[in-house]
Structure formats: structure tokens, C-alpha cells
Amino acid sequence: MSTVVVPARGQIRRLDRPVEPSENVTEEDLKQPSKVVELFLRLLRNVATLLRRWWPRRIDYEDFVLDSGGTEYRFPHGFKARVRWLVVDWLPDTPGVPHQLERVAGTGKTDDQTLVLASGAAGVVTLRVEEAG
């Protein structure tokens, strides 16, 4: 599951989309046992490949307004595990100033449900939070 959170617009939106099959199967194909076996084996192979692949869940907090001065911000993710986070877009209030975000640890701070970051610079950030595995 991938999600984007846009606080300015009050939106939470899923990024995943349903997919269509890459091949069509006709009634005529199903009347031929060898074609059915071939299709079934291909299907099992593809399912096994998908089940073994690591798909980290992620949330994008888009256009989140930050103040300077060490203000702490909570980013709830609910992954029940450690997360990785990165700034994917940054628009500082003062041109050329880096984002200056850092993780806040300690009691009541960052845990396996919520990422807490302190901001040392004002601006607008898009932050990606994903499960670490």
C-alpha cells in the first residue's frame, strides 16, 4: 500500500491502482489441456515471484508546512516497525537554506507507529516515510 497525505487540501489518497491481465484467455484455449496446464504453471510462477518480493508500504506527506526553531512534527504511519524517511521535495522560506530535519528519539517521541521530526528551518516539505523491513 502506498499513500499520499496532503494536509493543505485535507486529502489522503491511495497511490496503488488495479492492473489488467497481460494476456487474454479464450474458451477455445480452455478446451486444450496442454494450454490450461501452461497457463496455470505460468500463473503459479508469477504468484510465487510476487509473494517473495519485498514491497515496503509508504506514505508521502505532501506539501507539509514547517516552522523553524526546533518545532516537532508527528508523522503517524502505523507500520508497527522502524521506518526510513527522506525528503523528496523542499521549498525553503529563505532560498538556499537546507531542510534541517532530524529524527527525535526518547520517551513519547518516535516509536513504531509515529515518526517525530524536529525542524530547524522554515519551508514546505514533501516527506516519504516507508517501512524499513
Image (spheres, rainbow, N blue to C red):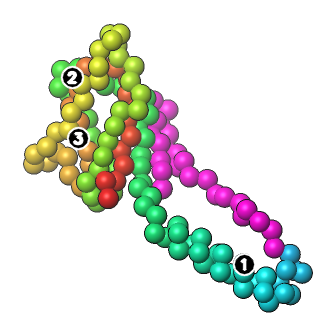
For the residues bearing labels 1 and 3, Cβ distance under 8 angstroms: no
Q: Secondary structure at mark 2?
A: loop
Q: Position of residue 68 (x, y in %)?
A: 23, 20
Please rate how many residues cluster around mark 2, counting C-alpha atoms within 10 Å: few if below 14, some from 14 to 19, many from 20. some
Q: Which residue is mark 2?
A: 120
Image quadrant where residue 55 sits:
bottom left
Tell me which corner region of the image, top left, top right, bottom left or bottom right, holds residue 112: bottom left
Taking the spot 16% from the left edge, 39% from the top edge, the residue there is 104
Q: Residue at point 77% right, 65% down?
A: 23
Q: Earlier in the sequence, mark 2 or mark 1?
A: 1
Q: Residues within 10 Å of mark 3 (few under 14, many from 20)?
A: some
Residue ID at (52%, 67%):
50
Q: Which residue is mark 1?
A: 39
Mark 3 residue element: strand
- Rendered-image quadrant of the C terminus: bottom left
Q: Residue 125 placed where, x, y %?
A: 37, 28
Q: Total label count?
A: 3
The residue that disc 3 covers is 116
Q: Residue at x 37, y 36 (%)?
A: 127
Mark 2–mark 1 Cα distance, whole angstroms, equals 57 Å
Q: Secondary structure at mark 1?
A: helix
Q: Nearer the viewer, residue 49 or 126?
A: 49
Q: In the shown orientation, is residue 123 left or right of residue 71? A: right
- Determine whether 61 is above or below 122 in the image: below
Q: Is residue 40 visible?
A: yes
Residues drawn in magenta: 1-25
Give the x, y percent position of residue 32: 84, 87
User: Toward the viewer: 106 or 27?
Assistant: 27
